[in-house]
Amino acid sequence: MPTDKFNPLKDEMLKILDKDGKIIDENLEPFIENDNLLKMYKTMLLAKVADIKALQYQRQGRMLTYAPNRGQEAAQVGSIAATEKNDWLVPAFRELGAWLYKGVSLEQVFLYWYGNEMGSKFPDDVKMLPVSVPIASQLNHATGIAMASKIKGEKDIAMAYVGDGGTSQGEFHEAVNFAAVFNSPVIFLIQNNQWAISVPRSTQTKSKTLAQKAIAYGIPGIQVDGNDVLAVYAATKEAVERARNGEGPTLIEAVTYRLGPHTTSDDPTIYRDDNEVKEWEKKDPIERFKKYLIDKGLWSEEEDKKQYEEYENFVGETFRKVEGSGLVPLEDIFKYTYAEMTPNLIEQYEEYKKYLQEEGM
């Protein structure tokens, strides 16, 4: 499906589903097996339920700072669904849907936000890097992984995520420029959710689109409706095939919206209008995709209600398990980084253990 006719300089955004879940242009509709369509939808729904619950747990003092994902489910799931199992997922910190689709368990997700570093230890068959909080630093990691794959003669690609604010960081330029020069098989997906904490997209860059930044690096760039899961999938699928065929990187801008706060430490009512949020709520990517599936006879409102309730119970049970897992052994805090603790770490460990004993802790 050729998407190169969508010129980012002219603000030509790729859209396949309208707000009612109807196909706009049948020539653009990607072929996706019915089972995969349902997997994509169910993952998005689980991400939504888990996200709502996680925010509640944090407000109750039962979880540490959390970065909500509501509104961005299509950008996350639509993109990762276009990759293969052996491809790498290189995240920032707001890709819950992609993590779940890739095979990271909800328990691991909750462990991470609970403050347990075991939440970053994924199964060997889940090729995903840990969460990266320093803005845009993960893009260099993704480029390096993709270069390693190329040098080794493998066909694996790297799928990297960054926010609109991350495109203003030096690491963004370094990663994309290096990947372009050395034809690295990596895809950079910008989740343009309109706000980098309190800085709006309008003051983030003078560029008309973020996708057009690809032109300066000499690589393909495309802007897609980030709330349209089929559009995100189609653009990513084409980029994946290009990368796997040795044609280098692609820059994708998924235009979406962060319905919640930047993190639970943020109060978005201070800097944005509630009416703006309400307008974007009407573009809910999950509702749009659900209508599409119902029209295809693959889903129903009854099934949706039942699935939602099952996920609520599952999320609750999973978090209670995490809460009941207890504290991490003191030694694990010090021995986690290296195969064997360094002399300096051993000294720190013994010193802190003595302190806790003296304090009766």
Image (cartoon, rainbow, N blue to C red):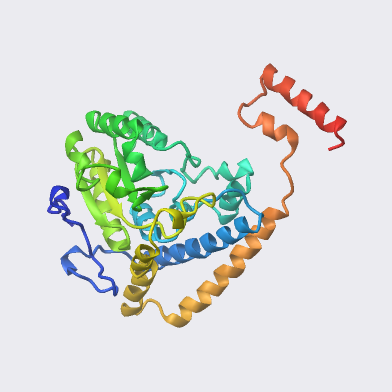
Q: Quadrant of the C terminus?
A: top right
Q: Is residue 37 above or below residue 99?
A: below
Classify residue 333 by image quadrant: top right
Classify residue 322 by image quadrant: bottom right
Instruction: Please tell me which residue lies in front, 10 or 306.
Output: 10
In the picture as drawn, the residue positioned furthest to the front comes out as 270
Q: Quadrant of the N terminus?
A: bottom left
Give x and y (percent) for residue 65.
57, 48
Residue 240 in view in this figure:
no
Rendered residue at 74%/35% (across/down): 330
Classify residue 106 by image quadrant: bottom right
In the picture as drawn, the residue positioned furthest to the top comes out as 343
Instruction: Please tell me which residue lies in front, 104 or 36.
Output: 104
Taking the image as shown, residue 313 lies to the left or right of residue 129, namely right
Give x and y (percent) for residue 22.
25, 74
In the picture as drawn, the residue positioned furthest to the bottom comes out as 302
Taking the image as shown, residue 235 lies to the left or right of residue 121, namely left
Q: Is residue 355 above or below residue 64?
A: above
Rendered residue at 32%/51% (across/down): 192
Residue 29 in view in this figure:
yes
Give x and y (percent) for residue 193.
35, 53
Count of picture labels? 0
Taking the image as shown, residue 159 lies to the left or right of residue 101, namely left
Give x and y (percent) for residue 260.
46, 58
